[in-house]
Image (cartoon, rainbow, N blue to C red):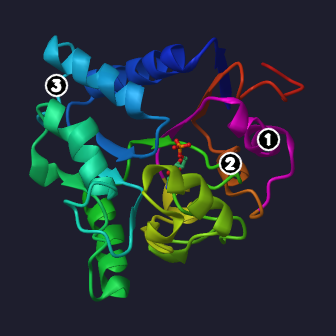
Amino acid sequence: MKLIIVKDAAEMSRKAAEIFAARIKKKANLVLGLATGSTPEKMYAELAKMNRRKEVDFTEVSTFNLDEYVGLRGDHDQSYRYFMNKNLFNKINIQKENTHVPDGMALDTKETCKLYELAIKGAGGVDLQLLGIGSNGHIAFNEPGSPKASRTRVVKLTKNTIKDNSRFFKKVSEVPTKALSMGNGTINEAKEIVLIANGANKAKAVKATLEGPVTEAVPASLVRDHKKITFILDEEAASLLTKKK
Ligand code: GLP
């Protein structure tokens, strides 16, 4: 496990973008696992900037997003498909057909989740997975208590997550209560993981992830012992850690 603590969100974003760009330079057809939320926004802007400057090429890259709200169409401004198009895919030279986000409007969600797993396998697995972290320690939409071996499935969001994410919606009642999410097991199979976190509201979850027990009660702790994982934290998110190296 590698721990990098930086000054602020801007530096966290630059560092993470550099890692992603370096891996794509090494392997042009890299398979990325991508995350949404406010945390990766600046990192995606960095990658778009690098792409504009022709420092990184996404032509052969493919992507699989972690999750999507159930009931939101891809053109809904709070869907994760919309977020990804707006913040990254529309700004880089990726082929849209190589980008995958679970279908929140799927009628047969079981089959959709199974096919999503198969698509990841078919692409050779995720080479590099980006993760954020929820204030309750969730990764993707694997809420506390999600099984270690869980796969892509429909999950119910906790009150805490609905409240956290309501800042993006007009009213709390508009926040979907369910999502399709890769499982902890799916995420752990990525060949490499980068987890980013910034801000004081993540400090408790970061502390529990890195210094608490490895437990399903804190899903992010389940990736801590991954063979190739880097945590990039800003000072605020790292503020409660006892060991800063
Ligand atoms: C959502 C996403 C997670 C993300 C988390 C944190 O719940 N499903 O993948 O890590 O929010 O979001 P933010 O970066 O906005 O704090």
Real-space CA distance between mark 1 and mark 2, rounded to the nearest whole angstrom? 7 Å
Q: Residues within 10 Å of mark 3 (few under 14, many from 20)?
A: many
- Name the residue type under label 3: Asp
**CB of mark 3 within 8 Å of CB of mark 1?**
no
**Does the Cβ of the disc 2 residue fall within 8 Å of ligand 1?**
yes
Q: Which residue is mark 2?
A: 135
Name the spot of residue 211 as percent of width and height, x first. Answer: 85, 39
- Compared with 242, 176 (above or below) is below
Q: Helix or strand or loop: what does disc 2 sit on?
A: loop
Q: Is residue 214 magenta?
A: yes
Q: Which residue is mark 1?
A: 204
Q: Is residue 3 magenta?
A: no
Name the spot of residue 152 as percent of width and height, x first. Answer: 45, 71
Q: Is residue 103 in view from this perspective?
A: yes
Q: Quadrant of residue 133?
A: top right
Q: Which mark's residue is nearer the viewer, 3 or 2?
A: 2
Q: Which residues are magenta?
A: 190-215
In the image: residue 232, left or right of residue 202: left
Q: Name the residue rendered at 42%, 46% in the picture.
A: 36
Q: Helix or strand or loop: what does disc 3 sit on?
A: loop
**Does the Cβ of the disc 1 residue fall within 8 Å of ligand 1?**
no
Q: Quadrant of residue 238?
A: top right
Q: Quadrant of residue 200?
A: top right
**CB of mark 1 within 8 Å of CB of mark 2?**
yes
Q: Which residue is mark 3?
A: 57
